[in-house]
Structures are given as structure tokens and as C-alpha cells.
Image: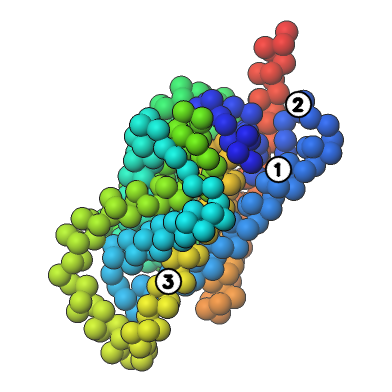
Amino acid sequence: LNDALRLDGEESNVSRSVSLNLRGGDGDGAGDLMQTLKVGFYFGLWYALNIVYNILNKKVLNVLPAPLTVGSIQLLIGGIYSMLLWGTKIRAAPQLTAEGKEKVTKVGFYHSAGQLLSMMSLGAGPVSFTHIVKALEPFFSAAVSVVVFGKRMKPQVYASLIPVVGGVSYACLKELSFSWLAFWAAMGSNLAFALRAVVSKSAMTPSTGENITSTNLFGLVTIYSFLISIPIFLLGEGRSFPGLWSAAIGGEDGKTAMEMVKAIIISGMFHYLNNEVMYLALGNVHPVTLAVGNTLKRVFIIVASVLVFHNPVTKQAAIGSAVGIGGVLVYSLTKQYYEKLEAMEKEA
């Protein structure tokens, strides 16, 4: 895995589609099959962990409406988990170079901003509205790839993202409530996470340090993110949090302090593990592909919410989900087609 993540800061050889269509290349059939199964496993596990996290996170925020503080605590829990793995030598501890510290600080800033802005959006408006806005993430990722790497895809490939975003947005559109705070927080989160994905890719290089695997990189990013988030949640909710906490443990739900602590810790662990697996997926796909997978993931979150909270399945949600999933297939085939054409042109 470590060798596979020694990238050159560009698209490299890990550009693959969500539907797991691999480009024709060097390896034999068995190697391609193993790579397909590995990427599929990463995406499946990522989806499962993210669904559980979203359900747990929603339950916590319903009782304790302090998104900045809860989001920061979740980062702290992930950082402690990583340090325990390094301290017990279950994982080899990473060693950062001066250049690596600069890169990780930058990724940590984007991760912290994306996490806290997402929590703010969820707290300021309906969940469906936040998911509608965050469905635009593939466009942000594609734009960032152009700005950072200078890599442009064919217009047809960009156009194929339209049904993905449109379908998922239509599936999530259940209420027309509008909040400017929720809108701009979700838009800011899109930009932060798109930058995080692309900058993380460039950080997976030997110049970053030793033992910089995808999982170790995310552990470092989480620790830096928590440190960056401290002044933010203290300024935003430092004074109000004690009152919110008292209301949470003395409210109608009858939650005890220990139950609330346990719920936050569990949500923090699922937040970390879900993002760690996402980093494993990032090591094997292009950032835009990851963004499309993240958009498709929202469809599964809708299905999970129906099963857990017994929400009725509307015709609108079914149509939107079908269009979104079909859009991912169109994007995959379109991107693969033009990549093959470019490869043939270079060989000619």
C-alpha cells in the first residue's frame, strides 16, 4: 500500500472510475481483478461507515445543538485513536520532513474547515438542503484539479457530471426551506473538501516524510485539524456550550452525562474510520472520481434514513436516485473513453 501511494503529485496511475472500470494497462488480468476488488471493498466500507456516522451524528446534534464543539471533539477522538496505534506500534509512526509539515498543515486546515462548516450547515438548516448543496462537490473537485494540477478533462466529461449532481439533488429535495448560513456553510465545505482531496494527493509523496501511508497521513491531518479547530469552537460556542450541555442531559430525552459522552465518542470513532477509509479510496482513484462517489453516497444515506427513521420513500426520491446512479455510470464510461483516446494519440 505504501508503494502504491508514492505519487508524483499529478493524476498518476490511480485514475479509475467509481464503477471500478480500470484503464487498460500494464498488469495482467489477475492483477486488474485484485485492484478492482480492493477499490470496491474500500468504497463499500466507506459507504457503510459513513451511513452509520451520519445517523449517529444526527442523533447527537438533535440532543446537543453545538456543531462546532461536537465536530472538534470528533477530530480529537480520531487524533487520540491514531496516537494510540502509533504508541503501541500497531502502525509504524510517521516522521514528517519540514516540507511534509507544511503540506499536512495545509491539508489539516482544509479538513478542519470542511468538517466544521458541514456541521454548521447541518445545524442551521434542514439536512436535505445541506445535501442538495453538497451534491455540487464534484464540480468543485474538477475545478480545483484544473487550478492545482492544470489538468483539464474533455467538456463531455464535465457535462457527464450534470446528471449525477442533478439526480442526487432531486432525490434530496424534500423541503424548500432556505437558509443563507446553511447554504454558504455547505458551499464552503464543498470547496474545503475538494481542496483537501487534491492537496492530500500531492502530500502522498516520499518528500513528505517516512511511513506516510494513506492511513498515517489522515491520522496526522486529523491531529492538525483538531489543533486548528480549538480557537474556532472556543470563539463560536465557548460561552454557550455549558448551557447547551446542561439542557442536553436534563432534557426530555433523559440522557445522562455518561450516555452523551459515550454517544459523542462513538460518533467520533465512526467519523474518523469513515474518513480513513475514504483516504484509502483516494489513494486508488482520481479526486473527481472520489467526489462523484461521495455524491452517490448521499443516495445511500437517504435509503438508510428511510430504514432507520421510517421515512416514506417518495417518487421524487426514487427518480432522483436512479438518475444519480445512472449519471455515475455515464461519467465513468465517458471519462474512460476519452482517457483511452488520449493514450492512443500519445502512442501514435
Q: Residue at x 59, y 27 (%)?
A: 12
Determine the secondary structure under disc 1: loop
Q: Residue at x 46, y 34 (%)?
A: 209
Q: Amino acid at mark 2?
A: Gly
Q: Residue at x 56, y 63 (%)?
A: 49
Mark 3, other Cα within 10 Å: few <14 / some 14–19 / many ≥20: some
Determine the secondary structure under disc 2: loop
Disc 1 designates what residue?
Answer: 20
The residues bearing labels 2 and 3 have C-alpha atoms spaced at a distance of: 44 Å
Mark 1, other Cα within 10 Å: few <14 / some 14–19 / many ≥20: some
Q: Nearer the viewer, mark 1 or mark 2?
A: 2
Disc 3 designates what residue?
Answer: 265
Disc 2 designates what residue?
Answer: 25
Where is 310 relative to 178, above or below? below
* Foreground pick, 104 / 18: 104
Specify the quadrant that holds the N terminus.
Answer: top right
Quarter-of-image position of residue 340: top right
In the rendered image, residue 101, in percent from the top left (x then y), is placed at 36, 37
Q: Nearer the viewer, mark 2 or mark 3?
A: 3
Where is 201 relative to 279, above or below? above
Q: Residue at x 25, y 57 (%)?
A: 230
In the rendered image, residue 201, in percent from the top left (x then y), is placed at 50, 35
